[in-house]
Amino acid sequence: MKLVTSLTSPFARKVRIVLAEKNIACEIVVDIPWSADTTVPQFNPLGKVPVLLRDDGSTLFDSRVIVEYLEQLKPWPMIIPVDEAQLIAVKRWEALADGISDAAATIFLERKRSSAQQSQEWIDRQLDKIERGLQAMNDDLGLHAYCVNGTYSLADIAVGSALGYLDFRFSDLQWRERFPALARLAEVLAQRASFAATVPVA
């Protein structure tokens, strides 16, 4: 298998962490979707990463689909619970974390445009999403060790990937000072080999 990806994408990092946690061999192919010579649209008509190229020639996208596939491919260690209530809780956390990542990536791309083309109103709207999302996650996490049922899962991987992207692209947000529960979780996750090996790099 091959994973077509950017080394800065929080969605791709989520997949790379799952690959590492499950010890699944997968070649990493770096391709920046907004580069003029990108080949990403050949594999994903939406032109987004990550894309998983399976050995049979088929492709999978986006990160949520890829993670579900990897969980089926190698169920242990389990990152998506079987219990229905816990499963829904994990997917809710993932949706919230991915929403924060999406808003942050939208701001990053908007700021790449010329200053005359940028919309500060649009940027502020995305910043509001990030702020509300962080507050909701911080409140829900509280004093719990992990996001769902005190057990490490895809929820923590998604949240950790989103927080890592904020550190990488938006250090000025200083979210740790305002969201101590998330800061504590981020410190715990940073000790895991899968997180240490996938820190975003420019």
Image (tube, rainbow, N blue to C red):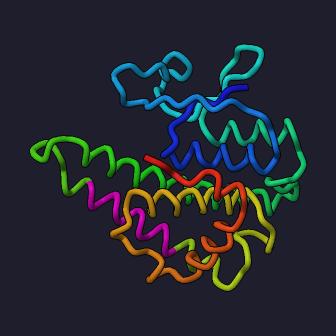
For the magenta stretch, what is the residue range?
123-135
In-front residue for pair 166/134: 166
In-front residue for pair 89/47: 47
Q: Position of residue 17 (x, y in %)?
A: 68, 50
Q: Main secondary structure of the magenta part?
A: helix
Q: Quadrant of residue 139?
A: bottom right
- Seen in the picture, residue 188 relative to 156 is either above or below; the reply is below
Question: Is 128 a magenta residue?
Answer: yes
Q: Position of residue 143 (x, y in %)?
A: 68, 85
Q: Position of residue 167 (x, y in %)?
A: 45, 63
Q: Position of residue 119 (x, y in %)?
A: 18, 50
Judge from the rendering whether residue 76 lies leftward or rightward of residue 174; answer left or right. Answer: right
Residue farthest to the left? 116
Q: Quadrant of residue 142?
A: bottom right
Judge from the rendering whether residue 40 lies leftward or rightward of residue 156; answer left or right. Answer: left
Question: Is 63 a magenta residue?
Answer: no
Q: Quadrant of residue 61?
A: top right
- Seen in the picture, residue 23 relative to 57 is either above or below; the reply is below
Q: Residue at x 48, y 67 (%)?
A: 133
Judge from the rendering whether residue 96 lies leftward or rightward of residue 100; answer left or right. Answer: right
Judge from the rendering whether residue 31 lies leftward or rightward of residue 139; answer left or right. Answer: left
Q: Residue at x 44, y 82 (%)?
A: 178
Q: Residue at x 52, y 60 (%)?
A: 164
If the image is split into quadrants, where does the N terminus sit? top right
Total label count?
Answer: 0
Q: Residue at x 53, y 73 (%)?
A: 136
- Seen in the picture, residue 69 relative to 139 is either above or below; the reply is above
